[in-house]
Amino acid sequence: MIGPDLPASANVVRYVGFARIRGDRVDGSAFCLRPGEGGLSIHWLDYYSDLTKEQQLIQVRRLLRLNVGARAGLAELNIGETRQYVASELPTLRFVHSPSPANDRYPADPAHSDIVGLPPADAEDLALLIGDMIAQRVKAVHPIADA
């Protein structure tokens, strides 16, 4: 279910495997849909508005529903800057709140969100262009391990 749009002022992070990190830059393929995906999983940092940035990152790390690599990272984006940058090529890009409920394996993740409106995987040239454009807006790559 697609939830409400996140505010343009909000900051989000996306888990990125080590193979897609080049120093402080991220390969654009980290922002491309795979076949069958409808959106990309992200986490809304500002959901935890009463916490410092480091505390926000700790919350995200704690609630990730992935097997994470030790050298992976969390790529940070500002929503408004990112949408504005890709708008001429992809006006359908949205960042939506989609909290994950608790289940047998994981606690609830109230900050979970998605990037939707991306080109499908079979539109390879456009998907790579948009992925590269989003990657150019990454503000920081935070280590996956607690600092």
Image (cartoon, rainbow, N blue to C red):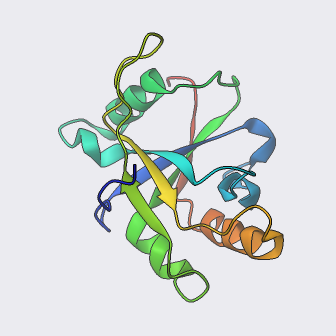
In the image, farthest residue toward the top: 104
Q: Quadrant of residue 108?
A: top left
Name the spot of residue 64 as percent of width and height, x first: 50, 27
Name the spot of residue 10 as percent of width and height, x first: 32, 58
Q: Residue at x 48, y 11 (%)?
A: 105
Q: Is residue 10 left or right of residue 83?
A: left
Q: In this view, does 60 lie to the left or right of 65?
A: left
Frontmost residue, 81 versus 83: 83
Q: Which residue is drawn at 37% across and 17% down?
A: 107
Q: Identify whether 136 is placed above or below 4.
A: below
Name the spot of residue 59 as percent of width and height, x first: 37, 27
Q: Which residue is drawn at 37% across and 45% down?
A: 98
Q: In which quarter of the image is residue 137?
A: bottom right
Frontmost residue, 17 versus 130: 130
Name the spot of residue 96 as percent of width and height, x first: 38, 56
Frontmost residue, 119 versus 51: 119
In the image, farthest residue toward the left: 50
Q: In this view, does 89 lie to the left or right of 20?
A: left
